[in-house]
Image (cartoon, grey):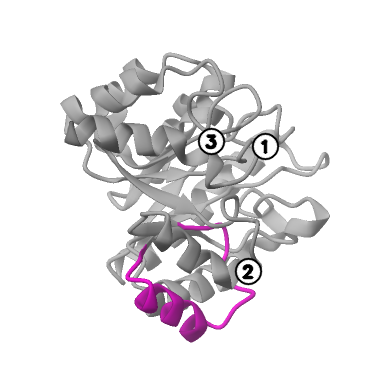
C-alpha cells in the first residue's frame, strides 16, 4: 500500500491550522504536507511536527499574493528578483523543518507577457532554484495544474512540465504529478505515471469531479494504488482533496485500504 501524507491546507479544516497536526496524527497519518509555511514561525511548525511525530514531506516556494489570486510568480519576468528572494526564504524553512523537497507553482502569465518570454522566464527561474536547492540537498519539483480550476496557469499537462524540466537541464528538478489535475487535463493516468516515474518525485490525489476524497468520483484508485506498488513507487502521496463532509468521515477510503492490507 502506498504511503499517504495529509495535506493540512485542505484536510482537517474543522480546526485552526496549528491544531491540524495533532488531528492528522490522531487520524493515523505519519506525514503531512501543506501549501505554505510562511505565515508561521519555523520553530512553531517544527514543534508541532516533533510533538506529533510527523514528517513534513512537502511545501511550496512562495507564490506571490495568494489571496489576490496569484498562483506563483516564476513565469513573470518583472519579478525574477522576488522569485529568487523567495527561494532563499523557502530554503530557510525547509532546513528548519527538515523538508526533503519543495514544489514550484509557476503561475499565471499576465496578458502583456509574450508566451515565449514567460516560458523562458520559467526555465531561468527553475534553473536558479534547482541549483540553490541542490546545494542544500533539497529536491525541486514543478507541478502542472488543470486549466479549469486555475485558468491561464502556465503549465497544464505533464508533457509541458517535462519539456520545461528538459530545458532546465538540472538533475535536481522533478515532476510533481497531481492525479486530479492530470485526470482533468489528459487522463491516461497509469500509463503516464509508469512512463515518467523516474522523473516523478511526488504524487498528490483527489477524485474527479469535485476534488473530493477517493471513491467519490470516476478515478479507479484501487487500480492506481496497486499499480504504484507494482512499479515500486516508495514516496508519499499527498491527500490534497476537499472532504465532501468532514475530514474524518471522508477517511473511509483510507481505513478500508489499511484493512485490506492487514486482512
Write down the residue under mark 3.
144
The stretch drawn in magenta includes residue 37: yes
Closer mark to the observer between disc 2 and disc 1: 1
Locate residue 77, reporting x and y percent.
Answer: 68, 54
Tell me which residue sits at (25%, 22%) in the image. Answer: 227
Disc 1: CA contacts within 10 A as few (<14), some (14-19) or many (>=20) = many
Is residue 58 in view?
A: no
Tell me which residue sits at (42%, 17%) in the image. Answer: 220
SS type, badge 3: loop
Locate residue 24, reporting x and y percent.
Answer: 45, 59
Of callouts 1 and 3, the N-terminal one:
3
Closer mark to the observer between disc 3 and disc 2: 3
Locate residue 136, reporting x and y percent.
Answer: 31, 72
Of callouts 2 and 1, the N-terminal one:
2
Q: Magenta region: which residues?
A: 33-55
Quadrant of image for the C terminus: top left
SS type, badge 2: helix
Of callouts 3 and 2, the N-terminal one:
2
- Nearer-the-camera pick, 171 or 224: 224
SS type, badge 1: loop
Write down the residue under mark 1.
153
Are the two marked residues, 1 and 3, in contact with CB atoms closer than 8 angstroms?
yes
Above or below for 170 versus 21: above
Write down the residue under mark 2.
81
Above or below for 113 versus 85: above
Amino acid at each position: 500500500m502506498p504511503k499517504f501524507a495529509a495535506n493540512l491546507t485542505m484536510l482537517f479544516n474543522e480546526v485552526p491550522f496549528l491544531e491540524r497536526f495533532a488531528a492528522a496524527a490522531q487520524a493515523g497519518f505519519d506525514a503531512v504536507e501543506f501549501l505554505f509555511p510562511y505565515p508561521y514561525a519555523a520553530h512553531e511548525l517544527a514543534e508541532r511536527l516533533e510533538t506529533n511525530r510527523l514528517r513534513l514531506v512537502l511545501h511550496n516556494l512562495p507564490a506571490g499574493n495568494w489571496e489576490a489570486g496569484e498562483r506563483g510568480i516564476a513565469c513573470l519576468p518583472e519579478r525574477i528578483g522576488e522569485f529568487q528572494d523567495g527561494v532563499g526564504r523557502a530554503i530557510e524553512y525547509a532546513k528548519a523543518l527538515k523538508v526533503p523537497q519543495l514544489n514550484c507553482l509557476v503561475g499565471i502569465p499576465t496578458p502583456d507577457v509574450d508566451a515565449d518570454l514567460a516560458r523562458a522566464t520559467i526555465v531561468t527561474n527553475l534553473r536558479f532554484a534547482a541549483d540553490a536547492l541542490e546545494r542544500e540537498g533539497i529536491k525541486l519539483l514543478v507541478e502542472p495544474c488543470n486549466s479549469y480550476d486555475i485558468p491561464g496557469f502556465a503549465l497544464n499537462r505533464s508533457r509541458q512540465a517535462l519539456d520545461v524540466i528538459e530545458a532546465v537541464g538540472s538533475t535536481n528538478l522533478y515532476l510533481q504529478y497531481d492525479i486530479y489535475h492530470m485526470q482533468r487535463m489528459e487522463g491516461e493516468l497509469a500509463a503516464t505515471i509508469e512512463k515518467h516515474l523516474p522523473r516523478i518525485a511526488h504524487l498528490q490525489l483527489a477524485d474527479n469531479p469535485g476534488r473530493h476524497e477517493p471513491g467519490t468520483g470516476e478515478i479507479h484508485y484501487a487500480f492506481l494504488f496497486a499499480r504504484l506498488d507494482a512499479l515500486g513507487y516508495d514516496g508519499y502521496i499527498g491527500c490534497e482533496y476537499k472532504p465532501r463532509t468532514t475530514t474524518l468521515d471522508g477517511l473511509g477510503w483510507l481505513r478500508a485500504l489499511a484493512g485490506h492490507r492487514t486482512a
